Image (cartoon, rainbow, N blue to C red):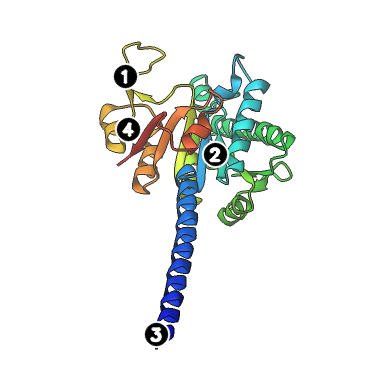
Amino acid sequence: MTSCTIYNGQEDGLRRANSIEIWAKNRFFALQSTSIKEMNSFRRVLLKLSGESLMGTKQYGIDTDRLRDYAQDIQSAVEMGIQVAIVIGGGNIFRGLSGAAQGFDRVQGDQMGMLATVINSLALSSALSARGVKNRVLTAIRMEPIGEFYAKRRAIDALEAGEVVILSGGTGNPFFTTDTGSSLRGIELEADVMLKGTRVDGIYTADPEKDPTATKFDRITYDEIYNRGLKVMDLTATTMCRENNLPIIVFDMDTPGNLLRVLRGESIGTYVGF
């Protein structure tokens, strides 16, 4: 009886030791998983790039150095395991509203602006391909073989396959800005956030390029944007984000590395939400 008792005690001790070892291993992997999750707080993002920013130091068109910087940051984001969809404006080539002010038919002016976004999208696609980053250009208006016609399922399948999806042509309709196109695509593709890359490092009380007393918001609500009359995006785009609970982060995309800092959760730029 005594020897039996000793044997059972040893067996219980071994079981407890094994249990502790298994618990420790599980805890280690759980902590490791949490750390990775915290680093990559976004699974899928909609990145809105300014066409005017593509000019870089030029007065018109595309600055190839700026394009390479963008492609490098986007590649790094993909390597972090983040799904990236992109909408680019066309202001560096043609802006529909500006054309209308100069006597162009508004509808045709907007269509010219849509084509400008396709040109920028092809340029970014080429820069990404040169770095070995798989990508595809989808267009809101049929124009094969320049790009594939946009469909939600096609875009999501490409994102889940690790491709960068570049969404061109706006919404395909006149009277809608590329900001509204970004909101629409971000909502459709179930993005976690819209990242609005601009030439300034966030949202200010006034235009910091014109008013040196302007102060920056670290965080602001959609309603505050309305009430203060801040020109972050057009009201249609902001309203769509508000009604569909799509948060926005406005940040300076022209500084290399800033995109990665945002994706890692660093507090740069301005967060827009409720």
Q: Dot 1 surroundings within 10 Å: few (below 14), some, or many (20 or more)?
A: some
Q: Judge whether residue 102 can be spotted in this image.
A: yes
Image quarter hosting the N terminus: bottom left
Tag of residue 11 = none
The x and y percentages for residue 216 are 34, 22
Q: Residue at x 50, y 55 (%)?
A: 29
Confirm or deny contact between disc 2 and disc 1 (CB under 8 A): no
| Mark-to-mark CA distance, 4 and 1 | 12 Å
Give the residue type that dot 4 points to. Answer: Arg
User: In the image, residue 11 lies at what x, y percent?
Assistant: 46, 77
Query: From the viewer's perspective, is residue 106 above or below residue 154?
Result: above
Instruction: Determine the residue positioned at 60% across, 36% down.
Output: 76
- Mark 4 highlights which residue? 219
x and y, in percent, of residue 161 in the image:
64, 53
Foreground tag (2 vs 3)? 3
CB under 8 Å between callouts 4 and 1?
A: no
Q: Amino acid at mark 3?
A: Thr
Q: Which mark is residue 215?
A: 1
Q: Earlier in the sequence, mark 2 or mark 3?
A: 3
Query: What kind of residue is marked 2?
Result: Gly
Residue at mark 2: 170
101 or 84: nearer the eye?
84
Q: Residue at point 45% right, 57% down? A: 27
Q: Secondary structure at mark 4?
A: strand
> Label 4: few (<14), some or many (≥20) within 10 Å?
some
Q: Which residue is mark 3?
A: 2
Precedes in sequence: disc 2 or disc 1:
2
Whether label 4 touches label 2, CB < 8 Å? no
